[in-house]
Image (spheres, rainbow, N blue to C red):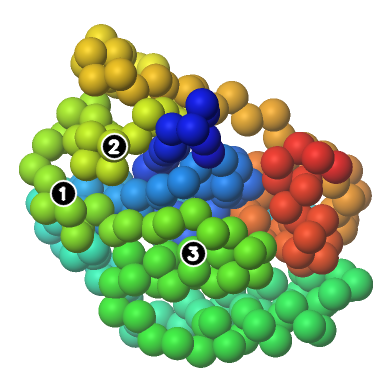
């Protein structure tokens, strides 16, 4: 993004997320740099290792089992997947049963089978590989940086500010709840503006009756071609 000939870099950041929702991608698409926060504390029952899909009986949570022993003292990149459980087979079966009526099912399910055939030891690597998959599907060219590669030691608001300063960002796109912890004065002192995302969830055609918002990106992707998915995510549909 440019303003009066000067580069105006926009940055956003978020923890890894398994099969993220539409708003996750909306922030990324609007940004020049996305910081993949893999070295922050893992939160139990968060969307780092689970997300919703729509089924014939309502929403269903697909969860990747992780080893929780000592998780309070670990960052996300240290959280191991419990691969003793057949979670990949179970997720693929659940997706198959509930999306096999989608028009583009055969083409898209084959891509998922290839994606799920890969082995990952920890949840951060799984989420990162999936993120790159969605980037490829939607032709998203936002630069992705793992926070673990930056070597920062700050927390909360100061951590995000450090990301912005490192990349010389002029704007930070925050989630709606960022207003509860971001120190806006420090951002202003560094000439960095904050945009709080207030995502108006689009409606689109789904299988299985009335529309249900806040499903995983998988739900939209299974029902539309990739070009239409992007238009719907950013509100141009």
The reply to whether residue 95 is in sight is yes
Question: Where 97 sits versus 162, above or below?
Answer: below
> Where residue 230 sits in the image (x, y, percent)?
72, 52
Q: CA distance from mark 1 to mark 3?
A: 25 Å
Q: What is the quadrant of the C terminus in the image? A: top right
Compared across the picture, whether 57 is left or right of 140 comes to: right
Check disc 2 and report its element: helix, strand or loop. loop
Image quarter of residue 95 = bottom right
Tell me the residue at 49%/69% (across/down).
Answer: 132
Neighbours of disc 3 within 10 Å: few (<14), some (14-19), many (20+): many
Q: Are marks 2 and 1 in contact (CB under 8 Å)?
A: no
What residue is shown with label 2?
168
Query: Badge 1: how crowded within 10 Å, few (<14), some, or many (20+)?
Result: few
Q: Earlier in the sequence, mark 1 or mark 3?
A: 1
Q: Nearer the viewer, residue 163 or 86?
A: 163
- The picture places residue 220, in percent across and down from the top left corner, at 75, 56
Task: Report x, y in % for residue 233.
Answer: 71, 45
In front: 218, or 145? Answer: 145
Spatial CA span between label 2 and label 1: 32 Å
Labels 3 and 2: the sequence-earlier one: 3
Name the residue carrying label 3. Answer: 131
Going by the image, does 123 lie left or right of 143?
Answer: left
């Amino acid at each position: 993004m440019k303003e009066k000939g000067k580069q105006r870099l926009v940055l956003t950041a978020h923890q890894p997320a398994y099969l993220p929702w539409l708003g996750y991608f909306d922030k990324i698409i609007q940004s020049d740099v996305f910081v993949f926060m893999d070295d922050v504390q893992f939160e139990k029952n968060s969307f780092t290792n689970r997300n919703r899909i729509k089924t014939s009986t309502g929403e269903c949570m697909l969860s990747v089992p992780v080893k929780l022993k000592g998780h309070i003292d670990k960052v996300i990149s240290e959280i191991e997947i419990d691969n003793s459980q057949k979670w990949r087979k179970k997720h693929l079966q659940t997706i198959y049963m509930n999306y096999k009526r989608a028009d583009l099912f055969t083409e898209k399910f084959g891509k998922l089978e290839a994606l799920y055939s890969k082995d990952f030891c920890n949840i951060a690597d799984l989420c990162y590989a999936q993120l790159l998959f969605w980037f490829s599907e939607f032709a998203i060219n936002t630069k992705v940086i793992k926070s673990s590669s930056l070597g920062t030691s700050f927390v909360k608001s100061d951590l995000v500010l450090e990301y912005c300063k490192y990349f010389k960002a002029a704007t930070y796109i925050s989630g709606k709840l960022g207003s509860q912890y971001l120190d806006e004065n420090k951002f202003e002192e560094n000439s960095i503006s904050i945009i709080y995302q207030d995502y108006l969830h689009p409606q689109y055609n789904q299988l299985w009756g009335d529309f249900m918002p806040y499903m995983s990106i998988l739900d939209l992707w299974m029902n539309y071609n990739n070009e239409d998915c992007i238009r719907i995510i950013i509100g141009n549909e």
